[in-house]
Image: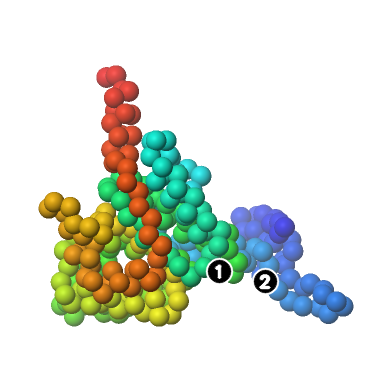
Amino acid sequence: MAKTETTETTETTCTLCEGTGWTLIEEEGVELVRRCECAEGRTRQRLLEQAGIPARYRHCTLDSFELWNPEDPTLAKTLRAVQEFVDLYPADDKGLLLMGSVGTGKTHLAVAALQQIMREKTPPVRGRFADFTALVLEIQMTFDGSGSSRDILRPLIEADLLVLDELGAGKTTPWVMDLLYYLVNTRYLEGRVTLFTTNFSDFARGQTESLTDRVSARIRSRLYEMCRRLELRGRDYRAERLASREGGLHL
């Protein structure tokens, strides 16, 4: 393992590559050059910083995911499926569609998978996080000519692994949906893996629209081909945890 030594200027120098980022190895009598572990570590850190993961979710890991209700089998089942996805990446090109009501832990699981893959897989993975509502607003802000929607979408299209959170939330227009289809379809055609989360199910219930109603039939059709569907059917565990904590306070 690479070690670093601290100088008086607080910079660190790797003892293996002496700060060059490259090491010499010998295989079958032939000297070869390869990237040093320290350089790969710096690359991982830079990619994580550029991934756009909100501060609220940077602590998320699969180990820290709470099985809030042991009687709800969907929680443990979904956690196992997400861990399997991480273990198999990138050999399996199927992404995940995490469906469930508000507060069931969908974003936690998606971000945890993204971060674990970015920290552990070799070569380093270019990952991105995007909130659907924020993405729609960014696109709409380009309508006055002050920016380019394609510049917004490009890093999301080119990411090795993308988390698109809260799919179907907020208000959209047909033009925005066309751009989102372009994002989803391009990633599909180029074989890039995507994790989606959504509060909408495949079936309309009462006044609640279905995911197809929210994102169009053609986008939902692509999701069938791109992803394995995982559904968390529990209650709003986030609200219940907050209520239990507040209930334990005596002021």
Query: As drawn, which residue projects farthest toward the left?
Result: 207
Give the quadrant of the N terminus. bottom right
Q: Amino acid at mark 1?
A: Ala
* Rendering coords of residue 79 (x, y %): 46, 49
Residue at position x 43%, y 50% in the image: 78
Residue 37 placement, left or right of 109: right
Q: Earlier in the sequence, mark 1 or mark 2?
A: 2
Q: Which mark is residue 9?
A: none
Circle 1 sits in a helix, a strand or a loop, which is it? Answer: loop
Rendering quarter of residue 221? bottom left
Q: Nearer the viewer, residue 218 or 86?
A: 218
- At label 2, the amino acid type is Arg
Front one among 155 and 237: 237
In this image, 198 relative to 8: left or right? left
Element under label 2? strand
- Marks 1 and 2 sit apart, C-alpha to C-alpha, by 23 Å
How many numbered circles does the render carry? 2
Residue ID at (47%, 54%) = 81
Q: Position of residue 35 (x, y in %)?
A: 67, 71
In the picture of the structure, the residue carrying the numbered disc 1 is 91
Residue matched to label 2: 35
Image quadrant where one finds the C terminus: top left
The reply to whether residue 43 is visible in this rendering is no
Is residue 171 in sight in this rendering?
Answer: yes
